[in-house]
Amino acid sequence: MRISEVAEQTGIPPRLLRYYEEQGLLVPERNSSGYRNYTVTDVEVARRVRQLLDAGLSTATIRTVLPCLTERAGRLAPICEETVADLKREQVRVEKSIQALTASRDAIATVISAGDSASFPAGAHG
């Protein structure tokens, strides 16, 4: 099937599908004219890539773990032991990012609360 059909089925724009290919995440066949020919398997891979990107994984990590994932009961599941370790490292990285963002949010909230709007002189602007 053509890239436009895959885009329609997955909701992934053609530009992103080409990016997935550039990153080695998706490898559609090419016909004699050089046009991409996607299979049903390619559609599933594209959906998995999108799901993993949405989960915050980098394309480099996805390239590593993608071959070791399968779908079970509508969810991605690892089938290789090293994939579990890779995903746990990613989970720790995401948790650290959440902690850093939470600290930033709290620092901003502190600044905002210190600047009670009633304490600003009339006509003062930031």
Image (tube, rainbow, N blue to C red):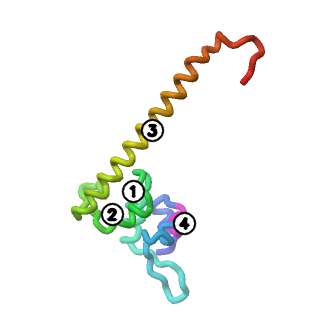
Q: Secondary structure at mark 4?
A: helix
Q: Nearer the viewer, mark 1 or mark 2?
A: 2
- Quarter location, residue 80: bottom left
Q: Is residue 41 above or below residue 106?
A: below
Q: Secondary structure at mark 3?
A: helix
In the image, residue 51 lies in the stretch drawn in magenta: no
Q: Nearer the viewer, mark 3 or mark 4?
A: 3
Q: Nearer the viewer, mark 1 or mark 4?
A: 1
Where residue 95 appears, x then y in whole percent?
A: 37, 43
| Residue 100 tag number | 3
Q: Which residue is mark 4?
A: 14
Query: Along the horizontal axis of the image, is 108 left or right of 68?
Result: right
For the stretch drawn in magenta, the main secondary structure is helix
Q: Residue at x 43, y 56 (%)?
A: 53
Which mark sits nearer the N-terminus, 1 or 2? 1
Distance between mark 2 and mark 4 Cα atoms: 23 Å
Q: Residue at x 44, y 58 (%)?
A: 58
Contact between labelled residues 3 and 2, with CB atoms less than 8 Å apart: no
The amino acid type found where label 1 is placed reads: Leu
| Residue 52 tag number | 1
Contact between labelled residues 2 and 1, with CB atoms less than 8 Å apart: yes
10 Å neighbourhood of mark 1: few (<14), some, or many (≥20)?
A: some
The amino acid type found where label 3 is placed reads: Ala
Q: Residue at x 29, y 55 (%)?
A: 74
| Residue 29 tag number | none
